[in-house]
Image (cartoon, grey):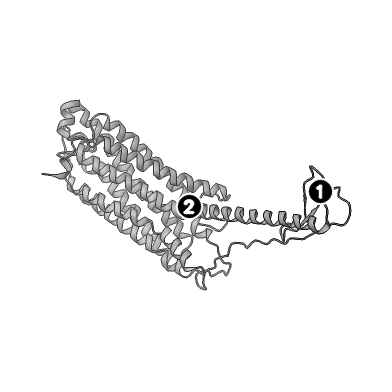
């Protein structure tokens, strides 16, 4: 018995899977954009490509939801028996549009990550990236267009009653080849930054963290491989059912690619949160030290502050170099002791590229890897 026929209706699972993928992609993309706006970094081409990819995924999710309401996800014979043969033509047309948009969204989202890498690569590696971008987009576009060009006339692709001829084998081969090439490029793009990152002058732990964050595209490659499996299954006899599996994994590939492309930027958000917590902890320690110094000053001078008085914190005019604080008691007479406290904060280390990777000798910080530019 075919294990894929155990579930008579993929519709409910299909809806959950599609909207979960769309929501996760939206969450990661929104955080990516938030990080950019927070750091006052303008949006780049890679950001716009991801936004367009997610919009295409959203449109596909809406179209599939409409189709599920009229039988998509069920076995074709059950859907036709319930909703009539005329409904099959409309559903197939919408699914053809969905297949086209998902294929292009996959191509655009992978191109986005490649564009990010273009900003940090040099020499032959940059040329290699352009070869990947051009070849991948050509093959994915051919795979997407094959959905419409597999029959003559074109309308026969979604209406079998129209006289004409179809080349379904061409569509299957084009789709499988483009998807397999896309999966291969996921692994290549994931591994490409490793030599560059490994030459950064930074701690090994941080180096590994950055490399892993830049390599999450391997997850998108894994989903592309699974999608290839469903592409080679015959869809003509049971398109409503088998097409549901294909759409689900296509949407998952778009979502994982968007999330993988956003993770390097989200490292900045995590790092800033960690630094904020550390700063608050240090600031609390400083306030405790200042209160302790105030009590010691009162004990030395033998004075007690008047009721309702609070210690005044007088800051020096140049707070950027240091933070000089003087404690005094307003209105108290006699001799008081003042204490100057010098507070210094370590700035984040600047990460420089080794010779040859930074030909201008200007140096770059980690933001060029995470934002695609130095900020």
Q: Residue lying at the far left in this picture: please name it.
A: 1
Residue drawn at x 56%, y 48% as measured from the top left: 38
**Which tag is nearer the camera, tag 2 or tag 1?**
1
Mark 1: give few (<14), some (14-19) or many (20+) Cα within 10 Å.
Answer: some
Q: Position of residue 195 (x, y in %)?
A: 42, 68
Mark 2: give few (<14), some (14-19) or many (20+) Cα within 10 Å.
Answer: many
Tell whether 224 sits left or right of 278: left
Residue 28 disc label: none
Q: Position of residue 231 (x, y in %)?
A: 22, 48
Occupied quadrant, residue 181: bottom left
Residue with the mark numbered 2: 266
Residue drawn at x 29%, y 51% as measured from the top left: 223
Q: Quadrant of the N terminus?
A: top left
Occupied quadrant, residue 7: top left
- The earlier-in-sequence mark between 2 and 1 is 2
Occupied quadrant, residue 240: top left
Residue 305 disc label: 1
Residue drawn at x 72%, y 54% as measured from the top left: 291
Q: Secondary structure at mark 2?
A: helix
Q: Using the image as rendered, state which of residue 139 and residue 3 is in the foreground.
A: 3
Q: Position of residue 239 (x, y in %)?
A: 19, 39
Q: Quadrant of the C terminus?
A: bottom right
Q: Position of residue 216 (x, y in %)?
A: 38, 56
Q: Residue lying at the far right in this picture: please name it.
A: 334
Q: Secondary structure at mark 1?
A: loop
Q: Using the image as rendered, state which of residue 240 and residue 281 is in the foreground.
A: 281
Q: Using the image as rendered, state which of residue 25 and residue 181 is in the foreground.
A: 25
Alpha carbon distance from label 2 to label 1: 50 Å
Total residue callouts: 2
Tell whether 225 sits left or right of 129: left
Tell whether 81 sits left or right of 41: left
């Amino acid at each position: 018995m075919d294990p894929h026929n155990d579930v008579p209706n993929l519709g409910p699972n299909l809806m959950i899977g599609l909207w979960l993928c769309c929501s996760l992609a939206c969450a990661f993309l929104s955080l990516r954009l938030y990080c950019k706006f927070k750091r006052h970094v303008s949006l780049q081409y890679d950001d716009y490509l991801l936004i367009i990819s997610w919009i295409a995924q959203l449109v596909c999710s809406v179209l599939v939801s409409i189709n599920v309401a009229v039988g998509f996800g069920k076995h074709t014979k059950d859907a036709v028996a319930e909703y009539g043969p005329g409904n099959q033509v409309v559903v197939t047309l919408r699914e053809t549009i969905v297949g086209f948009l998902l294929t292009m969204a996959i191509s655009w989202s992978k191109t986005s990550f490649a564009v990010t890498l273009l900003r940090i690569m040099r020499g032959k590696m940059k040329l290699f990236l352009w070869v990947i971008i051009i070849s991948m987009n050509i093959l994915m576009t051919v795979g997407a267009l094959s959905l419409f060009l597999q029959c003559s006339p074109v309308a026969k692709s979604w209406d079998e009653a129209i006289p004409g001829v179809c080349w379904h084998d061409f569509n299957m081969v084009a789709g499988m080849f483009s998807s397999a090439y896309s999966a291969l490029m996921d692994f290549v793009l994931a591994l490409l930054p490793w030599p560059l990152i490994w030459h950064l002058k930074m701690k090994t732990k941080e180096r590994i963290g950055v490399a892993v964050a830049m390599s999450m595209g391997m997850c998108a490659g894994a989903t592309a491989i699974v999608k290839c499996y469903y592409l080679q299954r015959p869809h003509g006899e049971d398109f409503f059912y088998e097409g549901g599996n294909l759409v689900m994994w296509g949407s998952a590939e778009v979502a994982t690619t968007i999330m993988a492309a956003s993770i390097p930027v989200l490292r900045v958000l995590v790092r800033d949160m960690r630094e904020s917590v550390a700063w608050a902890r240090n600031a609390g320690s400083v306030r405790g030290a200042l209160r302790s110094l105030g009590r010691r000053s009162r004990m030395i001078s033998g004075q007690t502050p008047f009721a309702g008085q609070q210690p005044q914190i007088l800051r020096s005019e140049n707070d950027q170099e240091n933070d000089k604080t003087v404690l005094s008691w307003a209105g108290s007479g006699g001799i008081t002791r003042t204490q100057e406290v010098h507070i210094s904060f370590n700035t984040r280390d600047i990460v420089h590229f080794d010779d040859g990777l930074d030909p201008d000798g200007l140096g770059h910080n980690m933001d060029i890897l995470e934002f695609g530019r130095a900020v």
